[in-house]
Each structure stands twice: as structure tokens, then as C-alpha cells.
Image (spheres, rainbow, N blue to C red):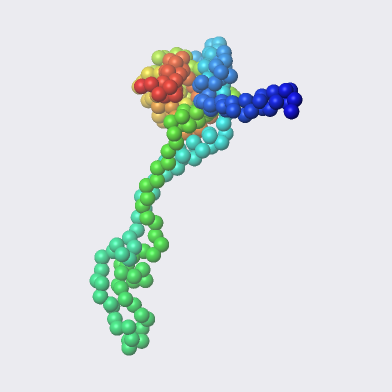
Amino acid sequence: MSKESTKNKTEDIKIKKEKSPKVTLAANDKKAKGEGVSVPVFSIEGTENGSMTLPGELFDVKVNKALLSQALRVSLANQKTHFANTKTRGQVKGSTRKIRAQKGTGGARHGSIRAPIFVGGGIALGPTFRKTILDLPKKMKKAALIAALSAKTKEGGVMGLEGIDRISGKTKQVQEFLSKIAKKEALFVLGTKEDKVLRAVRNLKGTEALLADQLNLLAIATHKTLMFTKEAVDKLEIRITKEISGRK
């Protein structure tokens, strides 16, 4: 065997022994750490005031549709309630004696008065209470949240908001603002609790206000437009970065 062929085989063996790269979250992906994505900023009066740059590792990553679908199924399944419950023949009260003799009466054979055929007996195939809770690993939850934010941004459903301190608490003011920017079913994401904002949006159908710490996948999926304040973006970035790294 020649030296050249031996060298080629050695190189092949070395290539096979190389470890595959570790799969990490989008927040640690070098490709995701870009300059960010620019979105328009609107004042509460409904005028466009420039733009705002959102962090690319949260708002501009490749969307994992399979993960997003799985996380949504889990979130929706956990919203369901199964409170209906019926008792079987073994759970209802009633005598255990045989109702009548096996033979001689001319009637059908019966043993227990708790049988489903009798009034007051058990239910044969009724609903039973069950508590089902589905869950996902923390990293999958965070990756799904980032994917949802990125998908919403690519659809043009993410905007900046300024001047929330000028909201008087009147529903009409927020309604006029949404009509001026031609948006409905908006989610206002705030950095700190603003009682006047919460009061102004609570009577608007499909419109809600949440803190950045409360933002979740279901809220993003059920609103067509997300309105972020600058403070909310900063707090959301800190929150997700801490949860990914495992720090408290």
C-alpha cells in the first residue's frame, strides 16, 4: 500500500471522529446577533415618529415552525377545563341485594338497583373529571417565544410606541389611536405597570396590555399587532437572556 493512500485513510478517520456542533438557542446563535431589525414608532396621537431598532436575537431569527406549533398546542391544551364528572354504578349509593329472584317472575334478569338501566343508577359512559397538564422544557419555551416574536415581526405586526404617559385612561383615546394607524386587536407591551393604560384598553375587544415580564406565546399568537415601548423591549431582552443563561 502506498504512503499516499495510507495518508488519505488517516484523514478520513480523523474526519469521522469530529464531534457534531451543539444545538443552541437562537439567542446564542452568531447569525442571530446582527444589527437588529428596524420597526416604525408611533406616538399615542397616531403620528409616525421615526423608527426603533429591536434586538436581532429576539426579533429576527429563523422561525422554527414545528417548535412553534408544538408550543401553541401545549398552551391551548392547558387552557382547557374538564370539570364535568359523573358517577358509575360502583360510585352511586344503593342497596346491594338482588332486586328479584333470578327465575319465576317472568321479568328480565337483574341483580343491582345501581345498574345504569334504573333511575338513580350509575352512568354507563358519562364524562369523568381529569386534570391534564402538558409542559415543555424551559429552553423550548424560550425558543418558541423568540420564534413567535420573529414571525410577528416578519409579518409587519410589531411596532414601537411612545407617549403612553399621555394616555388619560379613556377608552376613546386608545380607540382613536388604533383607528388612525389602522390596526385592530393590538397588544400593548409595557415596561412598568400603567394603570391608566390598563383601564383604557380593558373595554376594547381584542385589545390588551401586558408587562414585558408577562408576555407569553398565546398572547402573541392571538393579537395581530404588538406595540412595544422602549422600556418594554429592554426588559424583555433582560428577561429572556437571564432565562436562557439560567441566571436568576
* Quadrant, the N terminus: top right
Q: Quadrant of residue 7?
A: top right
Q: Nearer the viewer, residue 108 or 35?
A: 35
* Quadrant, the C terminus: top left
Q: Position of residue 62 (x, y in %)?
A: 58, 26
Q: Residue at position x 55%, y 11% from top?
A: 50
Q: Is residue 178 above or below residue 76?
A: above
Q: Nearer the viewer, residue 37 or 49?
A: 37
Q: Nearer the viewer, residue 58 or 233?
A: 58
Q: Position of residue 83 (x, y in %)?
A: 36, 50
Q: Quadrant of residue 119?
A: bottom left
Farthest front residue in view: 1
Q: Residue at position x 43%, y 27% from top?
A: 215
Q: Residue at position x 57%, y 15% from top?
A: 34
Q: Position of residue 207 (x, y in %)?
A: 46, 29
Q: How many marks?
A: 0
